[in-house]
Amino acid sequence: MNRVIKGAVFVYPTETSYGIGCDARDKIAVAKIFKIKGRVASKKMTLIAADFNMVKKFVDARTLRIPEVAEVMRELWPGPLTLVLPANAYARKNLAPQIISKNGTIAIRVPDNQLAREISQQLQAPIVATSANKAGKSACYSAAAVRRAFKNNKIQPDLIIDEGTLPKRKPSTIAEFTGKTWNIIRAGSIKI
């Protein structure tokens, strides 16, 4: 699968809905996702990592040692929880610039979907994790719905991994630890 996925923009199942992604280091593929979705450039994309070891490779180590952050990761990953965390120097050098926010953070999760984690593992990098739909439209829970969502697009995903119809679930919760408390950016499947 690695030869097919490398350099490609692909649609894949997650534990919440179908996502559209690519290797998060690939600037051209990340830009293509923005075009496919019609997403504004100022809205950063989230990431999926294969496991905690991969997260450590891209996130500031001091943040990972904060007890509240470590506990949430230990208890709620893998799962539909995206954490906004400070990127380290390696991430700033290697990830596509469209991924890192102006304040130097990335939004990353280890999902409860084996296929998504396997893709990340095969690429040895986080993958972009944004819903496979046009910006502002409803999430897609089947490959057929994704095809309908993008059918009039001039630019199409390179590959759609069809795992059938997924159960309808809330999107991932997005949270950031402010140093004192959790700031919930998007309420979703998991409560902190």
Image (cartoon, helix red, strand yellow):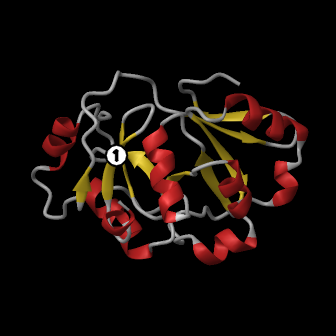
Q: Quadrant of the C terminus?
A: top right
Relative height, residue 55 to residue 32 (above, below): above
Q: Position of residue 18 (x, y in %)?
A: 34, 39
**Which of the two residues, 178 or 126, is positioned nearer the viewer here?**
126
Q: Residue at x 54, y 58 (%)?
A: 126
- Mark 1 closeness class: few <14, some 14–19, many ≥20 residues within 10 Å: many
**Relative to 111, 19 lies left or right:** left
* Residue that sits furthest to the left in the current view: 152
Q: Amino acid at mark 1?
A: Tyr
Q: Residue at x 58, y 51 (%)?
A: 49
In the structure shown, which secondary structural element does the residue marked by tag 1 occupy? strand
Q: Position of residue 166 (x, y in %)?
A: 32, 27
**Which of the two residues, 128 or 187, is positioned nearer the viewer here?**
128
Residue on which disc 1 sits = 12
Judge whether residue 1 can be spotted in this image. Answer: yes
Q: Quadrant of the N terminus?
A: bottom left
**Which of the two residues, 127 or 51, is positioned nearer the viewer here?**
51
Relative height, residue 17 to residue 32 (above, below): above
Q: Position of residue 63 (x, y in %)?
A: 83, 52
Q: Residue at x 45, y 64 (%)?
A: 23
Place residue 17 in its image quadrant: top left
**Relative to 75, 29 lies left or right:** left
Q: Residue at x 54, y 72 (%)?
A: 97
**Relative to 158, 21 lies left or right:** right
Judge whether residue 44 can be spotted in this image. Answer: no
**Relative to 57, 15 lies left or right:** left
